[in-house]
Image (cartoon, grey):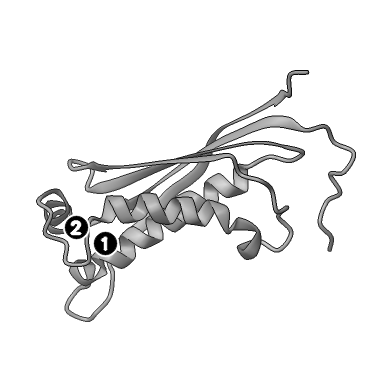
Amino acid sequence: MRQIYVGDKPVAYREAIAEGYIRLRRETIEKILSGQVEKGDPLTIARLAGVMGAKTTPQLLPLCHNIRIEAVELDAWVEKEAQRIGVRARVKTHEKTGVEMEALTAVATALLNIWDVVKQYEKDENGQYPTTFIEGIRVVSKIKGEVDG
């Protein structure tokens, strides 16, 4: 087991976009839309947590390089009819390795924070989460371009 050597690779512009979703009960979606979630606005918390998640990726993934992140953009939205919240993260840098793992970690962290904020509304009578689940976390796109002279 080893971390891959990237010392001989050229610095390049790197960007990755990832997304994912959390399915919630209709009643929970209504609470979110009407601003009635006791712990606060799940979308705002998710955006902040996602940025923090991207920045702490090497602490969570031991073989991931510690790179200088230049920007993290995180969006979260409610899809009322689908009974879910979507999260999309875009991470940018000029480095020797990509930022896909940072984008994926941002999305996962944001979705887990949404779950945490609304979990009291998602439990059934036995304290279980039969209809709550995170799905579709994936890299939507990545870009690698050489640094201009």
Inspect this view and state whether residue 45 appears. Answer: yes
Q: Residue at x 90, y 39 (%)?
A: 8
Inspect this view and state whether residue 23 appears. Answer: no
How far across and how far down the image is residue 76, in percent? 33, 43
Residue 25 falls in which quadrant of the image?
bottom left
Q: Secondary structure at mark 1?
A: loop
Please give left or right for residue 21 compared with residue 83 in the image. right
Residue 110 falls in which quadrant of the image?
bottom left
Of the 4 image quadrants, the one containing the C terminus is: top right
Q: Residue at x 32, y 56 (%)?
A: 45
Q: Residue at x 78, y 33 (%)?
A: 11
Of the 4 image quadrants, the one containing the N terminus is: bottom right
Q: Residue at x 39, y 61 (%)?
A: 112
Tag on residue 109?
A: none
Q: Which residue is mark 1?
A: 131
Q: Earlier in the sequence, mark 2 or mark 1?
A: 2
Q: How far apart are labels 2 and 1 at the CA level?
A: 7 Å
How far across and how far down the image is residue 48, in percent? 39, 53
Q: Residue lying farthest front?
A: 149
Nearer-the-camera pick, 137 or 33:
33
How far across and how far down the image is residue 21, in percent? 36, 48
Please give left or right for residue 120 compared with residue 49 in the image. left
Label pair 2/1, CB-CB below 8 angstroms:
yes
Q: Which residue is mark 2?
A: 25
Nearer-the-camera pick, 89 or 136:
89
